[in-house]
Image: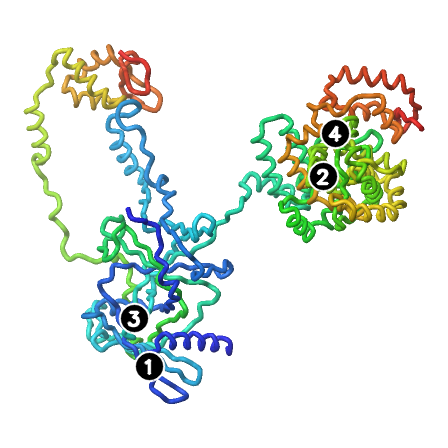
Amino acid sequence: MADKGEVDLTGTKQNTGVWLVKVPKYLSQQWAKATGRGEVGKLRICKNQGKAEVSFTLNEELTTIDGIGDKSSKVRAPREHPFTLQTVGGQTLAVFTENSSGQSDAEASGSVTGTGPDKIALEGVVVQRAECRPAASENYMKLKRLQIEELSKPLRFSQQLEKAVTTNYKPVANHAYNLDYEKRKKEEGKRARADKQQVLDMLFSAFEKHQFYNIKDLVDITKQPVVYLKEILHDIGIYNIKGTHKNTWELKPEYRHYQNEEKSD
Amino acid sequence: MQLSTQIVEEQYSLLEVIYAEMTSLGSSSSSTTEYIVRVPKNTSKKYNIMAFNSGDKVSCSIWTQARMERDMSNRRIYGEEETTEGAAGSEFGKKQREEARRKKYGIVTKEFKVEDQPWILKVNGKAGRRFKGLKKGGITENASYYIFTQSADGAFEAFPVHAWYNFTPQAKHRTLTAEEAEEEWGRRNKVVNHFNIMLQRHLREQERGEEGEEEGEKGGKKKKKKGGRGGDLRIHDSEEDLEMSSDDSEGSMGEDGEDKSKAKKDKGPKGKGKKKKKGSDFEDSDDGDFEGLEVDYMSDESSSEEEEPEKTKPNKGEDVPKGIDEMSDSEEESEEENKNEEDAKEEEEEEDGKKTPVQVEKKKKKDSSGESDSSEDSDIEGEAASALFMVKKRTPPKRGGGRGSAGNSRTGSRPGTPSIDNAATSNTLRAAANKLEQGKRQTVVSSSETPAAKRLKMEPSPQSSSGKSTPQPASGKSTPSSSDVQLTEDAVRRYLIRKPMTTKDLLKKFQTKRTGLSSEQTVNVLAQILKRLNPERKNINDKMHFYLTE
């Protein structure tokens, strides 16, 4: 894997300055709907006698909000958003990007330039912080109102039904599942006692895979009647009553030969 | 207000410089520029914020290279540990059973998400800084952050911020573990010299690493010496050695007192200065003071002339010994050799350190600083004794000045006689010391400086001593193996002339470790010697003391 952890420091070398802007949720949603090259609006910077004013104007087509209630056209997103500028303070905020390929666990986006799983690059340092605020307007107030109404609805609510529900369970002579079960059982038939040697072989091969077995599992594997199986097991194995492996059968020590044990048959 | 506008101004001007190609609308007082904002749709790059605390003073521009990767150390917690699969120890259907059980009890284990793991950022390679970046939650819940960068065509591009990581620097220096921190916390009222704490820890570890007894011994001694503040308890480790019968309480109290006073005075700037000076970060432990006090008697240690002027003297007593020591500095070297062999006082590494000038210096320092604190058994003993001798007799100290003073201080720590004497002679001693100082490179101890202050010196010495453990034995100062200390009539006589001692004290002087004799033999030989010497007896504090008058 190409030098995975190496951080590309070109951004900091060039001293690229970026702005960190906090944007309201609805606005970012609108931006996500942008078409084409992704133009979302215009940023206007005025320098008025030393004071700078920044304002963002949302594009006309992006002002329609849908999804809030049924009134999609009634509410529109406000267009004017003045920026409140703040200083970065003493904090050093750097921006780094991760270019993830399709392989890395969490990221699913395809990689464009990176060859390794993650290409980390330092894009720049934040020089200005800003908050994008919507200009107080009728539109905005309505929008907010709708939002609040949406959020205040409880997740669960009770609803009265006109008619009782009768479609769930009907009385049945015998359930389908049961019928299948009985059929299977008939096919299998009673378990016949196979040759002792064969059974022993089966047991040994089973115990090679795991050390401890439940009697039920052994019955399943060997398809022998329980009583017969138990007899054979008493010969070659022991039954653990206490301990970590409760109620399980394991081979007698002299029959075992696992890697970490010395005794072997 | 104005400041903030200024800052904003600056930032804006910066922006304008960068975005130079944009035309402004013109009027002098206000100018408006318009930019198109784009939100690129198909970018695969995820933008994240790397936030540093302002106090860490991180500047990305000075980074030459950096590496960053996820910290996967939590993975094992989430990925349940896999028990042996198949064969031994495994059970048929164990996994399913476990899963069923967990579902039944509703145990929900959180998934290990690589996305949420912290980052480890290493800047400037191995020797650079290390940072850990923890993800800050909840930034995308209510509002989205966007990064506005200006693109080549003058338009702004806005990228959504995916995650915010707070990066904090990771300490490279060693810190105390939880247990050790608890321990130190319990001692915080007693420990005055906090610089010592890490040093002691370092030494402790060194100790454990070293194999030889001598090494261990020296380490132990050093530990004690350096123990200074932190090791207050340790100082009095071998309390029997420390205390002479009659002077017991005095001595210990005195030492403590001196320790603390010294610590208070010497801590802080001095400590730092000394540290820098010595180039090590020991702190001056009071132990060293004692060693400096070692009188000529303690020939092993080089004079502690080097004690800096800083050495304040909580004990005046130290002046005297020091001065004396300094005066006889030149003699000391040679004498020390002799003394080493003959002296019963064991000098620890410090003494050995004398071997090299550095060591000598350090020892001296120790001596001076050892005034009140020295915790070394041998040091204390020897020094105390020597100090006593020095004081009483006002004879030119042979030993390393430090020694003498140390010894003095030690005994002087028993507020008794020594201090008084010392005070009286301080002036002359000081003069002598100064002269010596100039003359001798090694001896820097100004007589006025009591050994007490030289904790630092103490430390280096032990350090150096520890470093040169081999030379030490060679010098035959205090290594038991070389049996410097011989239980001879002369030695006993010297002791008794200087100060009245009980048999117990004498025995302490001639420890079996040093002389190489067994305790029985020591007792026998000592008894014989005493019979020969026939010293006078005096009852002090209900104990029978022997003493000789020349």
From mark 4 to mark 2, how far is it between C-alphas?
A: 16 Å
Quadrant housing residue B494:
top right
* Residues indicated by labels 4 and 3 sit on the same polypeptide chain: yes
Disc 4 packing (10 Å; few <14; some 14–19; many ≥20): many
From mark 2 to mark 1, how far is it between C-alphas?
A: 76 Å
Q: Chain of mark 3?
A: B
Q: Earlier in the sequence, mark 2 or mark 1?
A: 1
**Residue B22 percent location from the top left of the image:** 32, 80
> Residue B151 — which label?
3
Quadrant housing residue A171:
top left
Mark 1 residue element? strand
Residue assigned mark 2: B360
Quadrant housing residue A64:
bottom left
Mark 4 residue element? loop
Of labels 2 and 3, the one closer to you = 2
Residue assigned mark 1: B33
Amino acid type, residue under disc 4 in the picture: Glu
Amino acid type, residue under disc 2 in the picture: Val
**Residue B484 percent location from the top left of the image:** 74, 25
Q: Is residue B338 above or below residue B28?
A: above
Q: Earlier in the sequence, mark 4 or mark 2?
A: 4
> Residue B346 — which label?
4
**Residue B174 percent location from the top left of the image:** 54, 44
Of labels 4 and 2, the one closer to you = 2
Horizontal side, residue B48 vs residue A35: left or right: right
